[in-house]
Amino acid sequence: MKLGRDGVVGLIGLAVSLLLLPQAFGLPSLPIVPIGPGFYPTLVLVFMAITSAILLLQDIVAQRRAGP
């Protein structure tokens, strides 16, 4: 199956977010503050992974509808 530009960008975004997500989980937590320094990067990377996956799925569906 061939991917369009949106599918390639979605795949790259998904790969980048999934590669950086363990780094965000590995940030040290502070005992004083309930929300540590890894909270917002994790939130952004999860949102990026979800939107990239949606973009990839939309392109796959569009390519299947277009046919050969």
Image (spheres, rainbow, N blue to C red):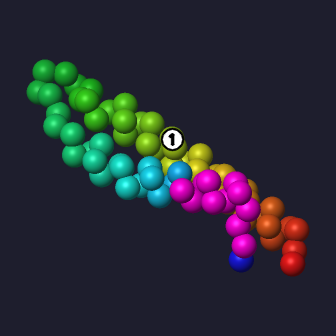
Q: In this view, does 66 lie above or below 46?
A: below
Coordinates of residue 42 in the picture (x, y in percent): 37, 40
Q: Residue at x 88, y 68 (%)?
A: 66
Residue beneath the point at 37% across and 31% down: 40
Side of 55 where 37 appears, left or right: left
Q: Name the residue under label 1.
A: 47
**Residue 44 located left or right of residue 55:** left
Image point (80%, 67%), residue name: 63
Nearer to the camera, 19 or 34? 19
Q: In which quarter of the image is residue 56?
A: bottom right
Give the percent coordinates (x, y) of residue 46.
45, 44
- Taking the view exactly as shown, the residue that stands out farthest to the top is 32
Residue 20, relative to residue 36: is it above or below?
below
User: Is 21 rendered above or below residue 35?
Assistant: below
User: Which percent across, then down, holds residue 3?
Assistant: 70, 67
SS state under label 1: helix
Q: Residue at x 70, y 54 (%)?
A: 6
Along the horizontal axis of the image, is 63 left or right of 45?
right
Q: Of all residues shown, which one is farthest toward the left?
A: 31
Q: What segment is highlighted magenta in the picture?
A: 2-12
Quadrant of residue 19 in the image? Answer: bottom left
Q: Which of 53 and 15 is in front in this view?
A: 15
Give yes or no for residue 53 being in the magenta stretch: no
Q: Where is residue 22 in the image (x, y as percent from the top left)?
A: 30, 52
Find out whether residue 11 is within the magenta segment: yes
**Which quarter of the figure is the C terminus placed in?**
bottom right
**Quadrant holding the N terminus:** bottom right
Instruction: Name the amino acid, label 1.
Output: Phe
